[in-house]
């Protein structure tokens, strides 16, 4: 399995000289079977423009899973040019909540945007997804589970193929369920089930642990929670994701360095990062 980070920022794009390495684009991760082009895309933040680059000249043929519908996970959709062409085929899945295309049209239609989802070129289907069932999507086994966030139904995903498993919880507010054993939030069943034994846990890391008390009401997680969830669930590697817009490259470097030598390897998700799984471990 090949995972390409196309956007790692949370909330709103954050371009500029201080964010060039981890990147300013909002949430988007492309997933491919070994030796293939990506057919599965997690979220369509502004980073989805990079997926067109990964595909080269080719039209997209695959599926987009939207964990929820906030701007930073949807606004790239009409700019995914590899999908907006006559020969492309795209299935868009989102947490079930009425007619999927109509729900998306609420952010993507005049006067908010010039066109509706139905006016994109190519073949599109907009589908509601129910949690708790294993689905075969583009040759991946996908399980969605509902997780606490804020302002709209939100899913985390567990995505597997014959070679590897990743867990993707881009926006997650575990303190909504209580303080948990360390004050960073509950290690609840859905989070544990998504992350259990995965090769790569991609997790909301919007706040520093010290910021949590003042900011948890915005609906996100602290970095310490992401790391400890990975540890508790037996994840092989944790990727801090959904970086707070003001967090600079130097800030993220320092944060990652603070977890060096810990029980689970921790890295910061960076735009353009390509991760082949399962990771080859040195003998
Ligand atoms: Zn978000
Ligand atoms: Zn959100």
Image: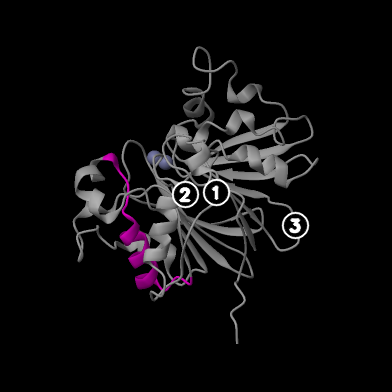
- Label 3: which residue? 36
User: Who's the residue at 59% across and 43% down the image?
Assistant: 64
User: Who's the residue at 28% across and 40% down the image?
Assistant: 218
User: Who's the residue at 25% across and 49% down the image?
Assistant: 211
Badge 2 or badge 3: first in the primary sequence: 3
- Label 1: which residue? 21
Residue 275 is left or right of residue 205, and the answer is right
Magenta span main SS: helix
Q: Residues within 10 Å of mark 1 (few under 14, many from 20)?
A: some
Q: Where does the image place residue 159, in percent across and percent down from the top left? A: 54, 59
Q: Decide whether residue 127 is among the magenta residues.
A: no
Q: CA distance from mark 2 to mark 1?
A: 6 Å
Q: Decide whether residue 225 is among the magenta residues.
A: yes
Q: Which residue is more in the foreground, 70 or 250?
A: 250
Residue 249 has which mark? 2
Disc 1 within 8 angstroms of ligand 1 (CB): no
Q: CA distance from mark 1 to mark 3?
A: 26 Å
Furthest toward the bottom, the residue is 283
* Residue 187 visible in rendering: yes
Is 269 located above or below residue 120 in the figure? below
Q: Residues within 10 Å of mark 2 (few under 14, many from 20)?
A: some
Q: Where does the image place residue 225, in percent across and percent down from the top left? A: 31, 60
Residue 252 is left or right of residue 51, and the answer is left
Identify the magenta region.
Answer: 218-236
Give the quadrant of the N terminus.
bottom right
Nearer the camera: disc 2 or disc 3: 2
Q: Which residue is more in the foreground, 18 or 166?
A: 18
Dot 3: element: loop
Q: Where does the image place residue 160, in percent across and percent down from the top left? A: 57, 63
């Amino acid at each position: 399995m090949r995972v390409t980070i196309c956007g790692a920022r949370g909330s709103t794009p954050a371009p500029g000289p201080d964010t060039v390495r981890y990147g300013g684009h909002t949430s988007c991760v492309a997933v491919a079977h070994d030796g293939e082009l990506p057919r599965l895309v997690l979220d369509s933040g502004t980073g989805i423009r990079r997926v067109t680059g990964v595909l080269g000249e080719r039209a997209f043929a695959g599926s987009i899973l939207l964990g929820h519908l906030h701007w930073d996970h949807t606004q790239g959709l009409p700019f995914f040019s590899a999908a907006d062409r006559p020969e492309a085929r795209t299935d868009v899945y989102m947490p079930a909540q009425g007619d999927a295309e109509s729900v998306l049209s609420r952010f993507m239609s005049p006067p908010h945007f010039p066109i509706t989802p139905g006016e994109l070129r190519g073949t599109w289907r907009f589908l509601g997804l129910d949690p708790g069932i294993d689905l075969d999507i583009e040759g991946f086994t996908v399980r969605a589970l509902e997780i606490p966030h804020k302002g709209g139904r939100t899913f985390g995903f567990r995505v597997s193929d014959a070679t590897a498993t990743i867990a993707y919880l881009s926006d997650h507010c575990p303190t909504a369920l209580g303080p948990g054993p360390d004050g960073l939030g509950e290690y609840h069943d859905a989070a544990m089930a998504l992350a259990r034994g995965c090769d790569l846990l991609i997790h909301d890391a919007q706040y520093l642990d010290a910021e949590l008390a003042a900011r948890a009401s915005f609906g996100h997680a602290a970095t310490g929670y992401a790391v400890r969830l990975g540890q508790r669930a037996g994840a092989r590697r944790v990727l801090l994701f959904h970086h707070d817009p003001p967090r600079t490259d130097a800030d993220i470097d320092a944060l990652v360095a603070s977890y060096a030598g810990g029980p689970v390897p921790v890295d910061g998700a960076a735009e353009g990062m390509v991760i082949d799984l399962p990771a080859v471990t040195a003998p």
